[in-house]
Amino acid sequence: MIIPTIAYYGQSDGENSLSGGEKRDSMYAPIQSVKVFERVAAQIEKRILDGELRIGDRLPTERALAEQFHVSRTAVREAMKILAQKGLVDMRPGRGTIVVDGAREAMENSIGLLMKMKSGEVGSSDDLVEVRAILETEIAALAAARATEIEIAAMREAIRVMDESLDDADAFITADNSFHEALAQATQNALILTLLNSIVHLLSEQRKQIFEVDGGPQRGQMHHRRILECVIRRDPASARAAMGAHLLQVREDVSAGAG
């Protein structure tokens, strides 16, 4: 699909100037000029969000876009970098620039990177447990109200795999992640799943530490079963309490592992 000719948001030389007799008014903040490449990116982004450009569509070449926008190829190149960072396009050598559905992954990566930068040493910090307490107790409650048989089956399978992997840290942690992901999916809220996935790498690191604590995996399994039972009974209040108890166990095991 080729982008039709796109109007360029030009700005006259005198747009921000004052006429000879006018005085500056301190009530107004200075106008910040928008860079040309940001305007190019904004126009293409709008066409993607409006559905005029769809997943899989190939954008015109850098030269063609520069001609359509009446801007330099450098401006187009910078605009493509912005769109790629947002997960809206994928720039592939030899294939051109393709519209992709990567916004969610880009957001997850950005949030995850931010938390890694701010969290410091995950194993010795209570920050991640506090975040989980805020998110996952309500996730459990919503899951108890909204879970389908598909998510319940996924949680059962994750618990089964964890039971068989008490001596295999990697397999156990992968299944542990799957259990909590299925719980988040059971809320039927895509944003919740995105938020949880954004910290999954931090969660994996925390779970590795807990796995090394004597009895840690077994205690976790006890709580997983209680949470699942509450979801199956469609009991949001009990599910919330069960997750709270699980996270208290997590906090204690993290502290023991750091000691």
Image: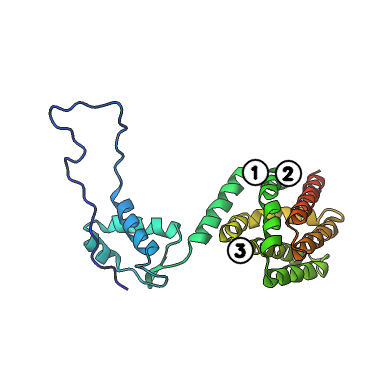
Residue at the disc numbered 1: 120
Q: Are marks 2 and 3 in contact (CB under 8 Å)?
A: no
Is residue 191 toward the left or the right of residue 238 in the image?
Answer: left
Which amino acid does the dot numbered 3 rest on?
Gln
Badge 2 local density, few (<14 within 10 Å), some, or many (20+)? some
Few, some or many C-alpha atoms within 10 Å of disc 1 (few <14, some 14-19, many ≥20)? few
What element does badge 2 sit on? helix
Find out whether the residues at labels 1 and 2 contact each other: C-beta distance under 8 Å. Answer: yes
The structure residue drawn at horizontal position 79% and vertical position 48%, both measured from the top left corner, is: 248
Residue positioned 72% across, 72% down in the render: 153
* Tag 2 residue: 124
Which amino acid, mark 1? Gly
Which residue appears at 34% of the width and 55% of the height? 42
Image position, residue 69 (x, y; %) = 24, 59
- Where residue 22 sits, quadrant-wise, is top left
- Quarter holding residue 197: bottom right
Residue 204 in sight from this viewpoint:
no
Q: Earlier in the sequence, mark 2 or mark 3?
A: 2
Q: Amino acid at mark 2?
A: Ser
In screen coordinates, is 62 left or right of 98?
Answer: left
State the image coordinates of residue 106 (x, y, percent, origin top left). Answer: 50, 58
Q: Earlier in the sequence, mark 3 or mark 1?
A: 1
Q: Nearer the viewer, mark 2 or mark 3?
A: 3
Of circles 3 and 1, which is in front? 3
State left or right for residue 224 relative to residue 113.
right
Whether 118 is drawn above or below 41: the answer is above
Q: Secondary structure at mark 3?
A: loop
Residue at label 3?
188
